[in-house]
Amino acid sequence: MPRQEGLIVQNMGSAVRGPFSVSFDLGSCAVLQGPSGVGKSLFLRMIADLDPNTGTVTLDGTDRTAMPAPMWRRLVTYVAAESGWWAETVAEHMRDVAAARALMPDLGLDPDLLDAPVARLSTGERQRSALVRAVVGRPRFLLLDEPTSALDAASRDRVETMLGGLKSTGLGFVIVSHDSKQAERLGDRHFVMAQDNLTEILS
Ligand SMILES: Nc1ncnc2c1ncn2[C@@H]1O[C@H](COP(=O)(O)OP(=O)(O)OP(=O)(O)O)[C@@H](O)[C@H]1O
């Protein structure tokens, strides 16, 4: 049987949402929209196995159960709109500090912030630093939950430019966005979530 490339979700659900079946491609950006509270964040968190769920999810044909959960979450990384931090400084969260230092200016972040306590960062700095943290983990897929919700237009543009560059290197994205202009700019595919179903909008 040929290897199934990309991120394939089959009958994934929990007691409160789903089941969902959908495939996402590498080197492509799927934008997910839908009313507040419908379950978009939960959907991303279930894919990353951060919330209890049943069903199967595979990446390039490998089932997530075939690897330790931290490895799955590194390959298929969820980035919350309001990120969680567990150590004191930003650098302590970076898998590759040199790569983070090199990436930060692209997002308008001073690399010296790496040595700062997380608590000192502004909301927008934290949001962009969380993106850096995810990217330097070398994921195959990024699941981004409103990735520019705390940012001004200039920072948002920087983030979108970086995401475009990563996509051209083969990374896959599922992005939740309430901004329909952003959805148009970033999305190769567009999905709308209603309770328990996910519909692709074909143009
Ligand atoms: N682990 C969970 N178990 C049960 N219910 C949950 C769980 N996580 C979230 N919910 C509920 O599921 C619903 C969907 O929440 P979710 O945060 O996914 O919505 P959303 O579509 O991302 O909303 P928004 O656009 O406002 O961020 C909410 O009513 C929430 O309280």
Image (cartoon, rainbow, N blue to C red):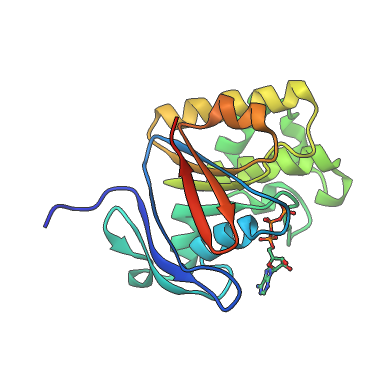
Q: Is residue 75 something that shows in the picture? A: yes
Residue at point 60%, 46% (across, down): 144
Q: Is residue 96 something that shows in the picture? A: no
Residue at point 40%, 54% (across, down): 22
Image vertical order of residue 140 relative to residue 14, above or below? above
Foreground pick, 195 / 175: 195
Foreground pick, 104 / 171: 171
Q: Is residue 185 left or right of residue 165?
A: right
Q: Position of residue 172 (x, y in %)?
A: 43, 41
Q: Is residue 97 left or right of residue 152?
A: left
Residue at point 56%, 47% (across, down): 192
Q: Quadrant of residue 42?
A: bottom right
Q: Position of residue 111 (x, y in %)?
A: 71, 32
Q: Position of residue 124 (x, y in %)?
A: 80, 38
Foreground pick, 114 / 187: 187
- For this orientation, the residue located farthest to the left is 1
Residue at point 48%, 49% (across, down): 199
Q: Quadrant of residue 122?
A: top right
Locate the C terminus by quadrant: top left
Locate the N terminus by quadrant: bottom left
Image vertical order of residue 37 relative to residue 112, above or below? below
Q: Is residue 112 left or right of residue 159?
A: right
Image vertical order of residue 99 relative to residue 51, above or below? above
